[in-house]
Amino acid sequence: MSSLPRIAPMLATPGTLPPAPADASWAYEVKHDGQRTMVYLPGDKTVRLRSRSGADITPAYPELTSLGTVLGTRPAVLDGEIVALDTQGRSDFALLQSRMGLAGSPAKAARMATKVPAHLVLFDVLFLDDGPLTRTAYVERRAVLEDLDLAGPAWSTPAATVGHGQQALEMTRAAGLEGIIAKRLTSPYRPGVRSPAWIKIRHVRTQDIVVGGWLPGRGRLAALPGALLMGRPGPDRRLRYVGSVGTGWSDTERRALAALLATVAADTCPFTEQPPVTGAHWTRPHLVGEVRYTTRTKAGRLRHPSWHRLRPDLTPDDLT
């Protein structure tokens, strides 16, 4: 591992399809709903998997161990996404959550691998043999990746389509997939940068938020959260209030959220300006979630938000 450079993942910017005249200058990939993973293959038959934050998550996914042998002695750094597939072959983050966080429990990870198999989707190569490829154009890196022919029992290299972005978007919509990623053919790989050269286009609007507090439910649900108070870190990393969300979760999820909120309880409001609510229970701004919404108000509030999921793979710093 010492011979391989640590590389932070390049991130996509939310947006819309490139303009039609520029369509042929972009490639389109299916957007997968999983855990972003940097894959380190030092060429000694081992593999090391690191999350977006840089944490070693290798023990959580024992079915990917044999990936270390596929390139023989050729060292490489690859970029990809670990997913769990539903019965229709679509990535399902809720399924994957049962696999995440098990890096410290190899025995449990092995048991869960038989119940919820993980699959690694590979979409970029950043280092190969004796040199980095980060300054190489996407279209050239993609050709190198496809030449590696990385297909196995728990990993694959799905196709990328040059041009035809509107068709790709409609096909993913019809298939019930999350959306697509548009990547400019000439773009280098910019580690750790959220770049407009990669655009994520989803079929619904979503936003990662930080939980800064909660409001109790009513009646028999008074001890459980009825709504979560949401924030987004600003450039100064201070938490700005963006609204409350009180729909979208099951009773089981509500109870799980209550347990998590109890672990981060706080006496003071974490927002830059106190939200216009009464009876709030404050929390330390540690929990990250994802919500769906329709649009934003001029004040930056999310309209008609609905809870989608927790994001245990993200920290508030990832949102700045």
Image (cartoon, grey):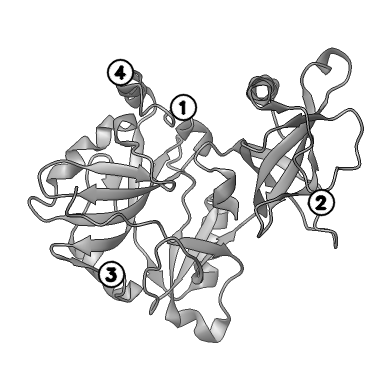
Say which amino acid is labelled 2.
Arg
Residue where numbered disc 3 is placed: 141
Indicate whether 258 appears above or below 2. above
Label 4 Cα neighbours within 10 Å, binned few <14 / some 14-19 / many ≥20: some
31 with respect to 187 (left or right): right
28 with respect to 247 (left or right): left
Counting residues from the N terminus, which is met first, the one under dot 3 or under dot 2? 3
Residue where numbered disc 1 is placed: 98
Q: In the figure, residue 21 lies in which quadrant?
A: bottom right
Say which mark, if any, is on residue 107: 4
Q: Position of residue 35 (x, y in %)?
A: 44, 43
Seen from the viewer's position, the closer of residues 94 and 174 is 94
Q: Secondary structure at mark 1?
A: loop
297 with respect to 21 (left or right): right
Counting residues from the N terminus, which is met first, the one under dot 1 or under dot 3? 1
Say which mark, if any, is on residue 303: 2
